């Protein structure tokens, strides 16, 4: 009996470790790998059966849209939806589609994202009425959206030889910088698995024995994709908030920011933040592109910033290096040698 319990704990720990490693690999994966995996998952017939089961059964997988996560639709189109339709350049998918863009503008971004960019199960007639569209107009917008997103995702999957890939654009909002994701896959949300509905599909015979064997790797892929999406949608708004003055062009360089401190504020490990930031960038309102890692400063910059805080206090300029060392440890938990403090102090 003892051996069985020990084996069970060992297997449980192994499964947990495997899940952790998969999540870490996905966080570090490039955008092309992430988009390719999600596309493969969503084109899998088993996934399609889980998210839209036959016979009116309850879905075993649903998408959950995260608040504040938006798709940069107007950037993807290559022009602002608020522009006059007559100014829209012809060519490609936009050729002859000025009327469709007018319909999208008329319904508003909220309705467009809710009824066209999500998988919310709403009857077409009800959705058309909510958008203020005739049934034929609703069908036209839906057909255009599907064809445009398919083409846009194929472009994103092309291999590009660059040191980093832009994942989102920063725009100036009424209350500060806002994040718009360059792939609709972020805006469409994470995957929620309903275990009761999943068991129901199995017992009803809607999932075959062969499909049951494929469930575990498919669900593992969904968990990995979720970890990447949740991590980035936590990290990017936090970065934008802390570096708002730089991103919006108010100051010439980023403020000192420790990856360790930000990770602690987000409830993540510094390693996770480092993996998410690696090889990714933001598009700034100025049109410039900046690597996420460039928005962080190293330990040296953080230490110099803390030493400066101490020295500008009343009487701080009269403190010895040993006294500064003690205050760094007591106030900030920074353990630096007196020699290091002296070196950093000379750079202020």
Image (spheres, grey):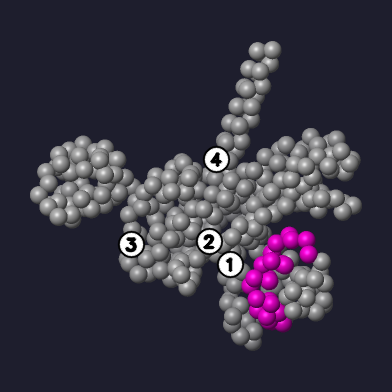
**The N terminus appears in which quarter of the rendering?**
top right
Between residues 10 and 253, which one lies in front from this camera angle?
10
The image position of residue 104, as x and y in percent, is 68, 76
Q: Whole-Å distance between the Cαs marked 3 and 2?
A: 20 Å
Q: Whole-Å distance between the Cαs marked 2 and 1?
A: 8 Å
Residue at horizontal 61 percent and vertical 36 percent from the top: 19
Residue at horizontal 25 percent and vertical 40 percent from the top: 329
Residue under pointer 1: 72
Left or right side of 344 for 296: right
Q: Give the vertical position of 77 relative to 276 (above or below).
A: below
Query: Magenta residues?
Result: 97-122
Q: Give the vertical position of 227 relative to 290 (above or below).
A: above
Q: Mark 1: few, some, or many residues within 10 Å (few <14, many ≥20)?
A: some
Residue under pointer 3: 253
Residue under pointer 2: 168
Sooner in the amino-acid sequence: mark 3 or mark 4: 4
Q: Badges 2 and 1: C-beta atoms under 8 Å apart?
A: yes
Residue under pointer 4: 24
Q: Mark 3: few, some, or many residues within 10 Å (few <14, many ≥20)?
A: few
């Amino acid at each position: 009996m003892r051996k069985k319990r020990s084996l069970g704990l060992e297997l449980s720990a192994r499964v947990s470790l495997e899940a952790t490693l998969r999540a870490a690999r996905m966080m570090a994966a490039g955008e092309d790998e992430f988009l390719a995996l999600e596309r493969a998952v969503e084109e899998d017939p088993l996934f399609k059966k889980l998210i839209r089961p036959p016979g009116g059964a309850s879905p075993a997988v649903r998408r959950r849209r995260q608040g504040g996560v938006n798709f940069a639709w107007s950037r993807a189109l290559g022009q602002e939806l608020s522009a006059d339709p007559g100014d829209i350049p012809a060519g490609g998918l936009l050729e002859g589609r000025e009327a469709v863009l007018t319909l999208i503008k008329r319904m508003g971004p909220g309705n467009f994202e809710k009824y066209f960019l999500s998988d919310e199960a709403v009857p077409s007639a009800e959705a058309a009425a909510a958008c203020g569209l005739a049934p034929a107009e609703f069908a036209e917008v839906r057909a255009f959206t599907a064809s445009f997103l398919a083409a846009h995702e194929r472009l994103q999957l092309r291999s590009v030889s660059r040191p980093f890939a832009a994942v989102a654009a920063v725009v100036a909002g009424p209350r500060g910088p806002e994040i718009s994701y360059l792939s609709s896959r972020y805006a469409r949300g994470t995957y929620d698995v309903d275990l009761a509905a999943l068991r129901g599909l199995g017992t009803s015979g809607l999932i075959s024995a062969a499909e049951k064997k494929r469930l575990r790797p498919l669900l593992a892929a969904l968990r990995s994709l979720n970890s990447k999406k949740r991590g980035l949608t936590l990290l990017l708004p936090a970065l934008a908030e802390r570096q708002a003055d730089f991103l919006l062009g108010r100051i010439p360089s980023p403020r000192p920011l420790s990856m360790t401190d930000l990770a602690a504020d987000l409830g993540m490990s510094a390693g996770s933040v480092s993996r998410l930031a690696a090889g990714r960038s933001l598009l700034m309102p100025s049109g410039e592109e900046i690597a996420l890692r460039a928005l962080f400063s190293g330990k040296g910059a953080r230490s110099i910033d803390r030493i400066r805080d101490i020295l500008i206090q009343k009487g701080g300029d009269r403190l010895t290096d040993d006294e500064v060392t003690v205050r760094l440890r007591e106030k900030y938990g920074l353990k630096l040698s007196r020699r290091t403090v002296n070196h950093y102090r000379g750079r202020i």
